[in-house]
């Protein structure tokens, strides 16, 4: 059965500008600008007044209805990104061989994982900042405006340190996400 109209609205906070042109959404805030294309989803995305964005989907089945909330969540994450930014904290877990992580240009290099000589490299995309935590040992932080780029980089680092050909119950070494979310506002 098809639903005639599914509609959701998103409120745009103060200090954030939103431009919509043919399902291409551009959000500008104090931390920068994010642009995202939603042309793969056939729905209406409109600005209602100055402070609201409305997403409409006409005559949709159940699977298509789910995409309405997904698009709204993406836009809300863009708004949080340009106002606060996102931070993923990752911890090193090792039992014997200490994992060594450094940056080399636009790459994060992971050395001495399980004592292997192979150097694992993960590309840092534009807008993602790598830093080592000063107060916590064996922790790195990835931060940026775009949640997609930050979380994808964290996932690539975690997958680069996956253990192969060994018992995963015994070999728990790796770099894992320990904390994630928007960057807390400083008071």
Image (cartoon, helix red, strand yellow):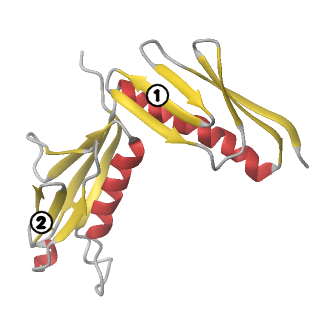
Tell me the SS state at disc 2: loop
Please tell me whether residue 1 is drawn above or below residue 165 in the rendered image.
above
Please tell me whether residue 54 is drawn above or below residue 176 in the rendered image.
above
| Marks 2/1: CA–CA distance | 38 Å
Q: In the displayed image of the protein, which residue is found farthest to the bottom?
A: 165
Residue 113 is drawn in which quadrant? bottom left
Q: Position of residue 5 (x, y in %)?
A: 83, 34
Quadrant of the frame with the C terminus: top left
Q: Nearer the viewer, residue 165 or 129?
A: 129
> Residue tagged by mark 2?
99
Q: Position of residue 114 (x, y in %)?
A: 15, 76
Q: Residue at x 69, y 29 (%)?
A: 8
Q: Position of residue 175 (x, y in %)?
A: 24, 61
Judge left or right: residue 148 versus residue 132: right
Judge left or right: residue 15 versus residue 121: right
Q: Tell me the crowding category of disc 2: few under 14, some 14 to 19, or many 20 or more residues within 10 angstroms, Cα based.
A: many
Tell me the SS state at disc 1: strand
Q: Residue at x 40, y 42 (%)?
A: 147
Residue 56 is labelled as: none
Q: In the displayed image of the protein, which residue is found farthest to the front?
A: 21
Disc on the earlier residue, 2 or 1: 1
Q: Nearer the viewer, residue 31 or 181?
A: 31
Q: Residue at x 59, y 31 (%)?
A: 21
Judge left or right: residue 27 versus residue 117: right
Please tell me whether residue 118 is drawn above or below residue 51 in the rendered image.
below
Q: Tell me the crowding category of disc 1: few under 14, some 14 to 19, or many 20 or more residues within 10 angstroms, Cα based.
A: many
Q: In the displayed image of the protein, which residue is found farthest to the right?
A: 1
Judge left or right: residue 67 versus residue 125: right
> Residue tagged by mark 1?
27
Q: Which marked residue is nearer to the observer: mark 2 or mark 1? A: 1
Q: Residue at x 24, y 62 (%)?
A: 122
Q: Position of residue 160 (x, y in %)?
A: 27, 69
């Amino acid at each position: 059965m098809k639903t005639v109209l599914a509609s959701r609205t998103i409120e745009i906070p103060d200090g954030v500008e939103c431009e919509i042109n043919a399902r291409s959404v551009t959000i500008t805030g104090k931390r920068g600008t994010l642009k995202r294309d939603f042309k793969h989803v056939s729905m209406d995305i409109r600005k209602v007044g100055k402070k609201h964005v409305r997403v409409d989907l006409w005559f949709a089945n159940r699977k298509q209805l789910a995409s309405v909330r997904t698009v709204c969540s993406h836009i809300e994450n863009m708004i949080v990104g340009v106002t606060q930014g996102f931070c993923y904290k990752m911890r090193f877990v090792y039992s014997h061989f200490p994992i060594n992580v450094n940056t080399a240009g636009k790459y994060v290099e992971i050395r001495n994982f399980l004592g292997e000589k192979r150097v694992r490299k993960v590309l840092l995309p534009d807008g993602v900042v790598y830093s080592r935590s000063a107060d916590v040992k064996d922790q790195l932080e990835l931060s940026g405006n775009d949640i997609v780029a930050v979380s994808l980089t964290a996932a690539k680092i975690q997958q680069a340190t996956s253990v192969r050909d060994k018992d995963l119950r015994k070999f728990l070494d790796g770099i894992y996400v320990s904390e994630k979310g928007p960057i807390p506002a400083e008071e």
